[in-house]
Image (cartoon, rainbow, N blue to C red):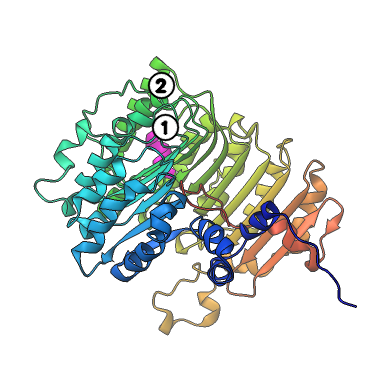
Amino acid sequence: MSVKLPLLNVDIIREISTNLPLSACASLMRTSWFFYHETAKVALRHIVYLFDTQRVELFARFVCAEDGRRFRYVREVHIGADGYETYPALQWLSKNIPRMTSLTTIGLADEDGLQLAPELYAAIASLVSLRHLRIGGAGPMSASLLSASRSKLQWAYVQWLPPYREGPDGMYLKRQSMHPLQLFSKSCDTLEKLASHEWYTPRNMPVSTIVYPKIREFSFNGDNYPLILPYVRAFPNLARLSLEDINYRDLLMADMTGGLITRLQEHRALNMKSQMDAGTWNKLEQLVGSITDLYIFAPICHIDRLDLINDVPESQKHRFHDMLFETLPFARPKQLQIISGSGALLLHPTSSLAAILQTPAGSRLENLVLNIDLDENDSEGDVAAALRTFAERLTQICSLRRLRLRVWGFSLRISKDSASRSRRELITRAERSLQTFDAVQYARSFAAATPPLEDVVAAIMDIREMEDVVATPAGIVPEDDAEHYRGKRRHSLSHPLQRDE
């Protein structure tokens, strides 16, 4: 007896097809006229990558089928720059992008590779459907696109060409009138996320009067000595801020002494005064950046989550400690993460990090993630004693709930004249203190002495095997369950258009 299969409603079949991978769409299109038409729509909901002439030709053949009715189903296109063998491929794109009336996301590669087709940028600017824009290697043509765009953007990521690649007629000298705050003005009432990287702001940049009330996330880098007030006024509801590598260039080219330190201090004072005179954000939910970035940008509001990277040169590591000492009282974070902190955070005799956090700077602290890199400058410190003092002081912070402590001691060993010295003589005081340090007992005692503390992860790493232990007030957590507590080492803001994994 044959079994009669139930017939599915057309709407159900269409809905099922929307979840198919691209390869399945291609196979299904060959089965019937219905799927030839409907599955083509599904296929065009996937990202279209046009990185060379061959891909453009294949895409053109596909979307031009059915009398070109498929153009309106294209949602997201990314255009490369280096694989175009002939100009007609770019010319075809320029002519047909306006037909993609439902296109919401577009990505453009380095405009150096697209200079043969400036009309492509004009075609993109004519669209009204775009909501997400990503441009890498942006220059004059990209700036013109942003100025002329008719779309109301929600997310935008722009990485600008370095000035040396823009040439004598580039934008570097024109940037006073072409700041991102002005270039995106047509989307000021819709933009929610903005990233502008490798932008160099002239010092005489006037404060913009354009306000972006919906922007909650802003990321920028490569901007030497930025003024904070224009961003406070432009983004009154900002929640998440990324400042990574703003001054990395200066720190590589100059030692942090003399004139550079004075300049950093003067710029910090300028930013602080402008906020005291005109106001600042009530608070930030998160700030990601280097300690130097935080120091010179100088927000004087509370920051719920503060993720800091140490960008201070090895020869000036004590500067990290000094800058942290000045910035934390303003931020008063609930969550504090420090990557590659100096040994002074543990070993400073009067103002270690724990001592700083006993002040109002630590009054809101709930989670602390601290990675400390010990080096030869810390070789004569009693690290074990410092760790015990660190724990004793942190137990007095009543709000603390979680601690992630990692101490890296691989660079403690002094190598100078090692060939003429015995192995015993090469072991430093810091190494000797770590050799007898019991990380298990340390984590257990810490958790037991701090009732509000939910868990502790302590990792002590030197020339021996790594000791990594998890403890809660109830005792040491079995290894099978410990990974739940360890979590990721570092968290940072994602850029606009970057998908969460």
Q: Nearer the viewer, residue 430 or 498?
A: 498
- Which span is picked out in magenta? 291-297
> How busy is the neighbourhood of tag 1: few (under 14 within 10 Å), some, or many (20 plus)?
many
Is disc 1 placed on a helix, strand or loop?
Answer: loop
Residue highlighted by disc 1: 298
**How far across and down, in percent of the image, does residue 160 sit?**
28, 48
> In terms of sequence position, does the residue under pointer 2 or pointer 1 come before the other?
2
Residue highlighted by disc 2: 275
Above or below — where is 39 with respect to 393? below
Q: Quadrant of the C terminus?
A: bottom right
> How busy is the neighbourhood of tag 2: few (under 14 within 10 Å), some, or many (20 plus)?
some
**How far across and down, in percent of the image, does residue 390 sit?**
65, 48
Is disc 2 placed on a helix, strand or loop?
Answer: helix
| Chief secondary structure of the magenta portion | helix
> Quadrant of the rendered structure where residue 114 is?
bottom left
Q: Nearer the viewer, residue 76 or 467?
A: 76
Inter-mark Cα distance, 2 to 1: 9 Å
Going 25% across and 63% down the picture, which residue do you hit?
A: 89
**How far across and down, in percent of the image, does residue 152 sit?**
40, 34
Judged from this view, the residue extending furthest toward the top is 277
Q: Is residue 431 magenta?
A: no
Q: Mark 2 touching mark 1, by CB under 8 A? A: yes
> Quadrant of the rendered structure where residue 176 is?
top left
